[in-house]
Amino acid sequence: MTATPVRLLLAATAVAIAGRLLDARWHATHDEFEGASEQLEAHWLAWLGVAAMVGVAAYAVRREGRRAGYLLVLAGGAIYATVGTWHFVAHANGEDPEVAHVFLALANLLLLAGVVVALAQRARRRSP
C-alpha cells in the first residue's frame, strides 16, 4: 500500500505532537530560561515535525491541487517558521517576547485545523 498525502501528513503531525510533548517535558524538568542551546534541546522535534508537515502539504498541493486543508497547513507553517525564528533569536538574546508564544499557539492551531480539514476532504472524496 502506498502512502497517500493524508497518511504522510498524519505521520508528520505525530512527529510535531511528539515534539510538543518533548518541549513540555523540558519545561517541566528545567527552571532555567531557554537560551539557544536549550531551545535546540527542547524544540528540535517540534521543528522537524512542522517542517515535515509543510513538506507533505507542498507535495500534496502539487499532486492533488489546492485543497483547503493543505493550504491551511502551508499557512500555519509559514506563520510558525516566521514567528519561531523571531522567538529563537529573541530567546538567544535573553528576551522573552510573550506575544510570540501567542502567535506560535495560533500557528499550531492552524496547522492542526489544516490536518482536520484535509482528513474531512479525503473522507468526502471517498464517500459514495
Image: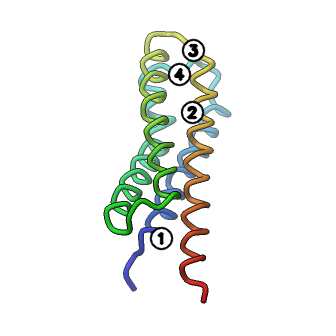
- The amino acid at mark 2 is Leu
- The amino acid at mark 4 is Glu
- Provide residue 95's location: percent of width, then percent of height: 53, 10
Please name whichever residue, 10 or 107, is drawn nearer the observer in this view of the structure.
Answer: 107
Image disc number at residue 7: 1
Q: Is residue 100 above or below residue 111?
A: above
- Left or right: 103 with respect to 77? right
Residue named by callout 2: 104
- Provide residue 17's location: percent of width, then percent of height: 57, 51
- Left or right: 55 with respect to 97? left
Please name whichever residue, 22 or 72, is drawn nearer the observer in this view of the structure.
Answer: 72
Mark 3 and 4 residues: CB-CB less than 8 Å, in contact? Answer: no
Mark 1 and 2 residues: CB-CB less than 8 Å, in contact? Answer: no
Label 1 vs label 3: CA separation? 36 Å
Question: Which residue is at the far top?
Answer: 94
Residue named by callout 4: 34
Label 1 vs label 2: CA separation? 24 Å
First in sequence, mark 3 or 2: give its number. 3
Which of the two marks, 3 or 2, is nearer to us in this view? 2
Question: How packed is label 2: few (under 14 Cα within 10 Å), some, or many (20 or more)?
Answer: many
Residue named by callout 3: 96
Please name whichever residue, 119 or 128, is drawn nearer the observer in this view of the structure.
Answer: 128
Label 4 vs label 1: CA separation? 34 Å
First in sequence, mark 1 or 3: give its number. 1
- Left or right: 61 with respect to 67? left
Name which residue lies at 57% across and 18% down.
33
Question: Which residue is at the far bottom?
Answer: 128
